[in-house]
């Protein structure tokens, strides 16, 4: 009988609670359970039922009692999650079980909220001023229905305006999870982890309600992290390396990685986002190797790692260790030894520490004094491996998609002395002076404060000719915003996009909330975007009390939330059409042009530098788009191969056309320069490689009429043994409406070694130039250039090369105009001739002898060349420089040669330049030739008559000694002295110097 009753009761429970719905699996400490999910009669609520769960070993009771206990449990379950009742869902994590709350957002939309979840042990006692530790597990079900404490922080006058406030406690490392209740069986949702702002000394994750964002199909996590001295005190050594607040963030992300799947979140699809100091923290985490792999996308709202307030540095005020010593002194701890000092600080009452921190900040003009630090600057391994600028310049940041941005009038909040009357010019100057001194006060490096102030006045006042007080106030606000937020944000995007990274987005938020408490002149201030990100207008709540929202506010919030959650889901804020997205780099002002949503929030796909893909005959190129003026943009495609690498058997041979490539080639970084000697006064900007035959193209937007643009091909100078096309940025020139091409070509012996026979006729550097011009002919139209309108131009040796190309049959038809700046083919240093110094073949033999290669055998020069092709490039470079110094000092000895002078007829210039010009054997193109007023410029300031005579004699001997015909150098020197000194009767030392230059 008992068995029958038990069966009936279980069947009754099944019929009442579970109607053949899909199965679900949950884990409890004892093991896994398979249950069933039922939708209740209101078609809104549903229940997961898990039946016949043993909660104890079989007692000495009858089956009837056991059955009644099971039915009782099921009835409690139904009552807890029944119709019209706030549900308290339970989840199990690896730490233990949690009971949260379920909130109805709308029809069939529910969000489960779990608050006050520990992600680290309380950082109290001996754990104060140490990195966070993983929390301990708990038994039973932990109450997660109410927020926990906020981390200790200073009193904030505006705190009384908040609708909800929280208690301070050092036991504050807790997080909150908002997860949508999905009825579609989705169990792995994108995760968004919010890092709150507050200058790193204020704020709490509790303030931000993630319910509305979560209802859009993402899991939201907000959390607290340690603030002020408790979070960022550093002694610049191992006693207290600092960055505890950042380590808290990393620990929270580790918790997300390990536990978020219990809340239907995908640990492999995490977006971190933050505002102000929280945004700066996001940026620092992007820079941090310690956070690598813990997130996959990032949003930065009004703060980046390049901002002046982002980090503290031992060389900058407020110096981290100095602030730590001040704090210790104020609370009565000895400062002689860092470790003992920290032990003392760990024993002090937390409020005492907080009061001292506040006093230090007030002494520092109210600016935060405890910042993140670069631990490696004092020998510690930590969050950052180097200062953010170095990390960004060297590409050592996380390769993730990002959104960065700022509000239209960031500095409108708290502008000193601002009001409806504006600023006088004197007030602007005084405030600007205070501003400069505030941010460069007592820095340990020399700063020209007056120079910086003068630049500010010129840029923001004098150039725009502003005198109106209201406009002066607006100009100061713009200046403060540019320095603090806009400029570092754009610069960070520009640096990041120099590397092959996924899309980087930039926005400017320009919508003023209808309930803004600030005057109209303040505009769209710092933090104004926050309510729209978290959906406050939609849910009709506000973190500030006594404010209401309009329909326009609600529409704006819907759009912002859609973009942010789209980014979290797809890595793109607008995978589907969103109102009037601004792509490319053009930033549009749309206020007053159309309705609110057409777009007061301007989102640009990488302002500063945007990724752009173009196809050429050899394959696809990914370059960058750069703003070159107010309405001017230039696309740059760098390191494009125009020939195969001239290495191995291709060394000392004419260049060969490059091979095609598959996929998209990265064309965002400059190529290495061709091998060349070190010049102490020239900084080593680009690496060297024999694989150097690349060119760069700078092309403006194609005109509306569709016509191709004129092309200008630059040939760099450097005496035929120095230089690179990568030194020359063609952006501004291209902005004038031309396509600019800069090239590398082989230099020194690698570019101009000649054995005066078929083994190595020479001129490889010139053949590289011709190959580059052939590439322009074949490919430049794909990049908006007209191959039938090409101008070649160059300087010094590059100018002489342009002049030689005018005489070269192989270059015929490849260009149509020429500009020569300070060098022509008739210059005494531009061409090498057999029998002259430097003798081309003689220099080749010297080089081979230095490198141990044979110079005379039955195979003539070919065996020597084969040996030279196998020599290490650095050894060859060093030997060639030794030959150069031995022969002509710093003058080049490997030069272009007329190949016909030793029986070759390759299409290179077929005779001496003088003969060719006299005979009319040059291209009939328009040219521009010229030179600078004082091309030759001795180092010292004056010449004596004796010095003049000696310099002229050396000058003549250098260019005529050991030629193959007899030259009376003394007679030539006498003629020069007579013409330039004796006849004009010059004796003044300065005039003698000027005469020698002439």
Image: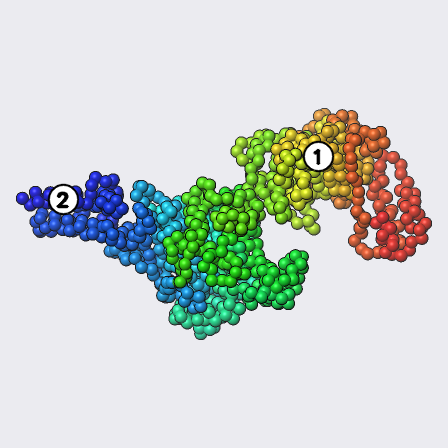
Query: Would residue 650 be visible to someone looking at this image?
Result: no
**Circle nearer the N terminus (1, 2):** 2
Give the farthest residue toward the left: 1
Decide: few, some or many residues near mark 2? Use Cα within 10 Å; few <14, some 14-19, many ≥20.
few
The dot on residue 374 is none
Task: Tell me whether circle 1 and circle 2 mark residues in contact (CB < 8 Å).
Answer: no
Q: Is residue 24 left or right of residue 428?
A: left
Please state the horizontal and vertical placement of residue 520, each as a whole percent of the image.
Answer: 52, 60
Q: CA distance from mark 1 to mark 2?
A: 90 Å
Please state the horizontal and vertical placement of residue 629, each as a whole percent of the image.
Answer: 63, 47
User: Residue 845 or 854: which is nearer the viewer?
Assistant: 845
* Residue at 66% over, 34% down: 708
User: Residue 925 or 884: which is nearer the viewer?
Assistant: 925
* Residue at 39% over, 52% down: 538
Q: Which residue is mark 1?
A: 790
Q: Is residue 943 above or below residue 366?
A: above
């Amino acid at each position: 009988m008992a068995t029958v009753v038990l069966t009936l009761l279980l069947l009754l429970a099944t019929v009442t609670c579970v109607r053949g719905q899909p199965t679900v699996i949950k884990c409890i400490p004892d093991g896994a359970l398979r249950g069933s999910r039922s939708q209740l009669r209101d078609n809104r609520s549903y229940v997961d039922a898990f039946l016949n769960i043993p909660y104890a070993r079989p007692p000495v009771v009858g089956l009837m009692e056991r059955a009644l206990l099971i039915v009782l449990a099921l009835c409690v379950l139904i009552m807890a999650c029944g119709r019209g009742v706030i549900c308290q869902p339970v989840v199990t994590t690896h730490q233990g079980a949690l009971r949260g709350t379920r909130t109805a957002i709308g029809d069939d939309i529910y969000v489960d909220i779990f608050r006050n979840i520990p992600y680290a042990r309380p950082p109290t006692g001996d754990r104060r001023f140490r990195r966070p530790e993983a929390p301990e597990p708990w038994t039973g079900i932990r109450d997660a229905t109410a927020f926990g404490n906020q981390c200790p922080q200073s009193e904030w006058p505006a705190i009384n305006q908040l609708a909800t406030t929280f208690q301070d406690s050092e036991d504050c490392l807790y997080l909150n999870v908002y997860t949508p209740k999905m009825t579609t069986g989705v169990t792995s949702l994108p995760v968004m982890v919010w890092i709150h702002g507050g200058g790193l000394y204020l704020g709490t994750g509790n303030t931000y309600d993630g319910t509305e964002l979560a209802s859009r199909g993402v899991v939201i996590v907000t959390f607290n992290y340690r603030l002020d001295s408790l979070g960022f005190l550093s002694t610049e050594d191992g006693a207290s390396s600092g960055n505890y607040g950042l380590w808290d963030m990393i620990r929270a992300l580790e918790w997300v990685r390990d536990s978020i799947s219990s809340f239907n979140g995908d640990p492999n699809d995490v977006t971190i986002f933050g505002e102000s100091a929280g945004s700066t923290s996001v940026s620092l985490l992007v820079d941090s190797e310690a956070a690598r792999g813990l997130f996959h996308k990032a949003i930065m709202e009004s703060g980046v790692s390049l901002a002046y307030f982002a980090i503290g540095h031992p060389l900058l005020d407020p110096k981290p260790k100095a602030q730590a010593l001040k704090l210790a002194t104020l609370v009565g701890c000895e400062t002689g030894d860092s470790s003992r000092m920290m032990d003392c600080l760990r024993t002090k009452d937390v409020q005492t520490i907080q009061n001292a921190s506040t006093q230090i900040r007030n002494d520092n003009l109210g600016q935060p004094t405890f910042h993140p630090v670069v631990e490696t600057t004092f020998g510690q391994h930590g969050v950052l491996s180097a200062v953010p600028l170095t990390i960004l310049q060297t590409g050592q940041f996380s390769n993730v998609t990002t959104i960065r941005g700022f509000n239209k009038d960031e500095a409108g909040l708290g502008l000193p002395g601002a009001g409806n009357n504006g600023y006088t010019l004197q007030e602007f100057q005084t405030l600007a002076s205070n501003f400069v001194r505030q941010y460069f006060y007592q820095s340990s490096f020399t700063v020209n404060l007056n120079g910086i102030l003068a630049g500010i006045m010129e840029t923001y006042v004098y150039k725009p000719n502003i005198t109106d007080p209201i406009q002066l106030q607006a100009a100061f606000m713009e200046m403060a915003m540019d320095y603090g937020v806009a400029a570092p944000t754009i610069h960070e995007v520009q640096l990041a996009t120099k590397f092959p990274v996924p899309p980087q987005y930039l926005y400017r938020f320009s919508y003023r909330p209808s309930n803004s408490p600030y005057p109209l002149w303040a505009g769209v201030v710092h933090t104004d975007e926050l309510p729209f990100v978290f959906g406050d207008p939609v849910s009709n709540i506000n973190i500030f009390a006594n404010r209401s929202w309009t329909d326009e506010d609600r529409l704006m919030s819907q759009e912002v939330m859609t973009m942010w959650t789209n980014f979290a889901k797809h890595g793109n804020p607008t995978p589907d059409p969103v109102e009037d997205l601004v792509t490319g780099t053009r930033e549009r002002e749309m206020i007053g042009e159309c309705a609110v949503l057409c777009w007061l929030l301007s989102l640009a796909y990488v302002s500063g530098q945007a990724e752009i893909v173009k196809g050429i005959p050899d394959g696809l190129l990914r370059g960058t788009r750069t703003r070159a003026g107010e309405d001017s943009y230039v696309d740059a495609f760098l390191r494009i191969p125009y020939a195969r690498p001239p290495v191995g058997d291709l060394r000392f041979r004419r260049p060969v056309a490059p091979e095609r490539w598959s996929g998209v080639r990265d064309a965002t970084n400059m190529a290495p320069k061709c091998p060349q000697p070190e010049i102490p006064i020239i900084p080593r900007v680009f690496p060297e490689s024999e694989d150097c035959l690349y060119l760069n193209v700078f092309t403006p937007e194609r005109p509306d009429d569709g016509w191709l643009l004129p092309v200008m091909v630059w040939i760099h100078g450097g005496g035929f043994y120095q230089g690179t096309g990568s030194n020359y940025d063609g952006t501004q020139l291209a902005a004038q409406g031309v396509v600019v091409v800069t090239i590398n070509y082989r230099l020194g012996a690698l570019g101009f070694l000649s054995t005066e026979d078929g083994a190595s006729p020479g001129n490889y550097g010139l053949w590289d130039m011709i190959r580059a011009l052939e590439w322009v002919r074949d490919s430049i139209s794909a990049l908006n250039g007209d191959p039938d309108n090409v101008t070649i131009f160059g300087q010094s040796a590059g100018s002489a090369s342009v002049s030689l190309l005018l005489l070269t049959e192989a270059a015929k038809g490849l260009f149509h105009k020429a500009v020569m700046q300070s060098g022509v083919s008739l210059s005494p240093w531009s061409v090498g001739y057999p029998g002259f110094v430097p003798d081309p073949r003689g220099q080749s033999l010297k080089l081979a002898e230095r490198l141990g290669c044979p110079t005379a055998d039955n195979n003539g020069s070919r065996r020597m060349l084969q040996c030279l092709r196998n020599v290490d490039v650095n050894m060859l470079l060093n030997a060639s420089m030794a030959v150069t110094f031995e022969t002509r000092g710093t003058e080049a000895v490997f030069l272009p040669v007329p190949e016909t002078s030793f029986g070759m007829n390759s299409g290179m210039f077929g005779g001496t330049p003088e003969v060719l010009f006299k005979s009319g054997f040059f291209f009939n193109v328009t040219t521009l030739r010229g030179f600078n007023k004082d091309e030759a410029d001795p180092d010292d300031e004056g010449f004596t008559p004796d010095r003049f005579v000696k310099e002229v004699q050396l000058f003549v001997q250098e260019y005529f000694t050991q030629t193959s015909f007899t030259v009376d150098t003394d007679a030539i020197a006498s003629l020069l002295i007579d013409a330039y000194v004796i006849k004009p009767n010059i004796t003044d030392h300065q005039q003698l110097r000027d005469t020698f230059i002439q």
